[in-house]
Image (cartoon, grey):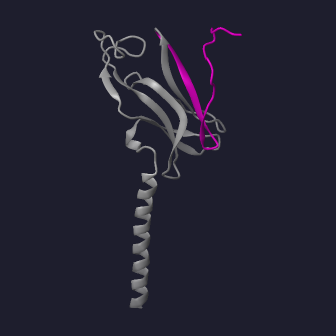
Amino acid sequence: MKRYLKLFISIVFLLVVFTTFNQQAEAANNPISPKQSRVTYILKDVNGATYKVYFAGTNEQKAIASPSRGDWTTVGMDAGKGDVLYKENYRLYTQSTKNRHIKATNFYFSHYILNTTGKTIHIFPSKYKKYPDILAVAYSIGNDYECAYWFYVKNGVLAQIMYRDTNLYSKRE
């Protein structure tokens, strides 16, 4: 009886040690840590599966928007006075809520100004079944004019809804 008890305890111990090291190894293969993400949302696809979407960059520059500065922190297109801004080359990452592996996407945002006060990244949850949630990454292109890149999750992969000029009044050929 003692022999079976020792065997059982040894097996449980080995399982605990294996799962601990396996999680650490899997997390080490991720391109980013979830703590590095400036913005994180959970999106649902058409099947109801949930995915975390991370908006992360490295070596961010942080500033408070001010009317007296003449650089990217100037009050105007991207910010109002006192808004907290970050500037960096950002990238979108996805993760299924069923596993720990984070995947890098092909969506980059070079020299993107992220306004955490004005919320330049939005989620539009679906109100109906069989429709995915929508993620919008907004940017300014003029005074009081904002455009956005639109994304949704399709078959576990982040997909862009439209890749062209979304301005209705743009030149058409």
Residue at the (40%, 21%) spot, across then down: 118
Q: Is residue 108 above or below residue 130?
A: above
Q: Position of residue 120 (x, y in %)?
A: 45, 24
Residue at the (62%, 24%) spot, across then down: 163
Q: Nearer the viewer, residue 67 or 89?
A: 89
Q: What is the count of numbered marks? A: 0
Q: Residue furthest bottom?
A: 1
Q: Position of residue 72 (x, y in %)?
A: 36, 16
Residue at the (53%, 27%) spot, across then down: 136
Q: Quadrant of residue 159?
A: top right
Q: Is residue 147 magenta?
A: yes
Q: Quadrant of residue 8?
A: bottom left
Q: Position of residue 88 (x, y in %)?
A: 40, 28
Q: Nearer the viewer, residue 167 or 60?
A: 60
Q: Is residue 17 magenta?
A: no
Q: Nearer the viewer, residue 78 or 111?
A: 111
Q: Position of residue 18 (x, y in %)?
A: 43, 67
Q: Is residue 140 left or right of residue 46?
A: left
Q: Is residue 44 left or right of residue 80?
A: right
Q: Quadrant of the image for the C terminus?
A: top right
Q: Is residue 45 above or below residue 21?
A: above
Q: Quadrant of residue 166?
A: top right
Q: Is residue 129 left or right of residue 56?
A: right
The magenta stretch is 144-173
Q: Quadrant of the image for the N terminus?
A: bottom left
Q: Residue furthest right?
A: 173
Residue at the (39%, 84%) spot, across then down: 6
